[in-house]
Amino acid sequence: MRAVVYSESGSSDVMQVVERPLPEPGAGELRVRLVRAGVNPTDWKSRSGVSARLAFDEVTPGQDGAGLVDAVGEGVEGFASGDRVWLMLAQHGRPHGTAAEYVVVPAGRAHPLPEGASFDLGASLGVPAVTAHRALTSGEGNDRLGPGTMTGRTVLVHGGAGAVGNAAIQLAVWSGATVIATVSSPEKGALASAAGAHRVVNYRDSDATAAVTSSAAAASRSPPRV
């Protein structure tokens, strides 16, 4: 199979495309044929040596991806060959991630991808969406998301156009919250609005503190219908 690998830290120049043997899943693992692979800041920060030292002799980057189950290891239940899945933390603590034609992951890091969801969507979920979910559920009294679970709450999302912020907006709106998002440009404001933000504050051309405070006060008087 083809895979992207690197064996030293550095810029993108340290990566190369090589041929490697097809990996076999062990007990509790799945082999997935990748259709799409996601790229996150954690991938390039780890490769560059900014956030971590090289932990293995050779690394295939990529925490996120989506594809089709190709082989099922001993003891794995709930998955079969051909199942559509999205992956998260595929390379966490392991040498090989999703920047390859195939990847082997613990079954707990694979999740069903519905037929109506694209592989592009599946590959973009992992790190950004799970981070957003964790941020929204780490507060007191709010450990689950879903319709109505955040009704009456106002959520401030800093950086509403980024991958994590955009996911946080969508999850919070889905759960019934009023969402105020901060952005740094009109173009990014359009992305935050498209994600569902009820009020968008451009902190480069306004007093962000005053604008957010005013928006929060307005939301408390007249929460949006969801």
Image (cartoon, rainbow, N blue to C red):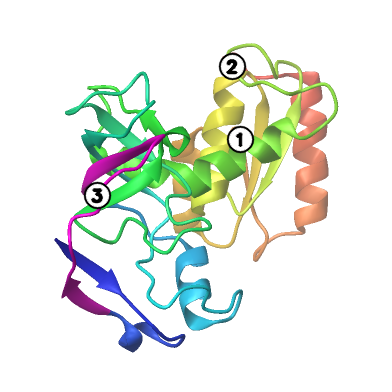
Decide which of tag 3 and tag 1 comes sooner along the chain.
3
Other-residue count near label 3 (Cα within 10 Å), few / some / many at <14 / 14–19 / ≥20: many
Q: What residue is disc 3 on?
A: 36
Q: Which residue is mark 2?
A: 146
Q: Residue at x 39, y 71 (%)?
A: 59
Q: Element at badge 3?
A: strand
Q: Nearer the viewer, residue 136 or 179?
A: 136
Per the rendered image, the range of residues in magenta is 16-35
Check disc 1 and report the residue beneath it.
133
Question: Which label's residue is closer to the chain start, 1 or 2?
Answer: 1
Mark-to-mark CA distance, 1 and 2: 11 Å
Quadrant of the rendering where the C terminus is positioned: top right
**94 sits to left or right of 68:** right
The percent coordinates of residue 156 (x first, y second) are: 72, 41
Tag 2: Cα neighbours inside 10 Å, few (<14), some, or many (≥20)? few
Task: Look at the numbered disc 1 and give the secondary structure of its residue.
Answer: helix
Evaluate whether residue 27 shows in this view.
Answer: yes
The amino acid at mark 3 is Arg
